[in-house]
Image (cartoon, rainbow, N blue to C red):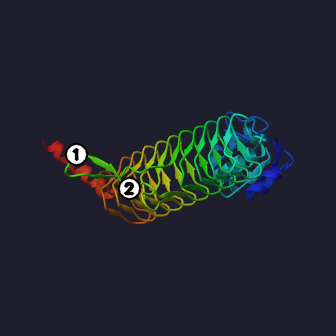
Amino acid sequence: MSRSLKEIAEAIGAKVQGDSSVQIAAVASIASATARDLSFVEDEKNLSSALKSDAGAVIAGDFAAASNAKPLIISNSPKLAFARAAAFLQKSNGDRITGVHASAVVHPTARLAANTTIEEQVVVAENAEIGEGTRVGASSVIARGVKIGRDCRLYPRVTIYAGTTLGDRVIVHSGAVLGSDGFGYVRDRKSGRYEKFPQIGRLVVADDVEIGANATIDRGALDETRIGRGTKIDNLVHIGHNCRIGENVVIAAQTGLSGSVTIDNDVVLGGQVGIGEHAHIEEGVLLGGQGGVLPNKVLRGKGVAFWGTPARPLREYLKQLATLAGLSKEK
């Protein structure tokens, strides 16, 4: 299904320059675009190649306003506009098949709203709730009492334990496990054995969160683990029990958070970051790849980049590296 350039521009809050009736079916790079595709350029130096491409139309900034070689969508932020156009087209071209597949097992007490899709071999347990327009991928398991909001997308083989709530427009990629027991034990000093501490809390995931493939997020031990609105979690991330993740946080792949970590709004965590229990990363902090934060440590400074293990401000980290390099040369 295609959309006119006018429809796309209206949907993303931009303006058309040139023929607004051009039909667009998908998005593509400048190199691979066809006459039915929409592409984009962020700066003037790439405009010429975009205008010479086979793309049916191009999203560009005000620097393209004088051009009439090709239909354009003009936006102050071409890349963001392109992402929104892609989402609009994807929704327009989405799978129209809804309903419950014959091989799925849905408990009679589960409540499925209108236009939900339950794919092959899905299990939906008693008293689970799935909101309108949500799609649950093949072989996923939705446990007892789980609540899933509107327009969510769960890819195949997602497992959601009891006591988990997902907001609206949440995306969960294949292999993710949400709401599993936290890693909590008490040692019997006499026998030396470890006995399991109760893991009976909840996991709450707010609206517009995306969770990557094979990510794992534990429920709270006695209370709850919470993931804030708009947070994006990459593949192979682990978040321990009782963690509190703020809004619009970005967590890159292979990062691990121990229990009871607090991450405030707008924090960015690079790949393979490790954070000890009860640490607190305050609003707007940037923590570079393989950074390590000791238990109970607080990192603060909006917009400040930290690096290394133990993590410290980037300038300090680089200064220490330079000092070590100088010492090795002296020898």
Q: How far is mark 1 from mark 2, CA to CA?
A: 36 Å
Q: Residue at (16%, 47%) from the top-left corner?
A: 327
Q: Which residue is denoted by mark 1 in the rendering?
A: 325
| Circle 2 SS class | loop
Q: Residues within 10 Å of mark 1 (few under 14, many from 20)?
A: few
Q: Pointer 2: what residue?
A: 259
In terms of sequence position, does the residue under pointer 1 or pointer 2 come before the other?
2
In terms of image quadrants, where is residue 76?
A: bottom right
Indicate the amino acid at tag 2. Gly
- Give coordinates of residue 135: x percent, y percent: 69, 45
Q: Quadrant of the N terminus?
A: top right
Q: Is residue 167 left or right of residue 300?
A: right
- Where does the image place residue 260, in percent across and percent down from the top left? 39, 59
Quarter of the figure with the C terminus = top left
Residue at 64%, 43% (x, y): give it.
46
Mark 1, secondary structure of its residue: helix
Q: Is residue 330 left or right of residue 97?
A: left
The amino acid on which the numbered mark 1 sits, given as a three-letter code, is: Ala
From this view, report whether residue 33 is shown above or below residue 292: above
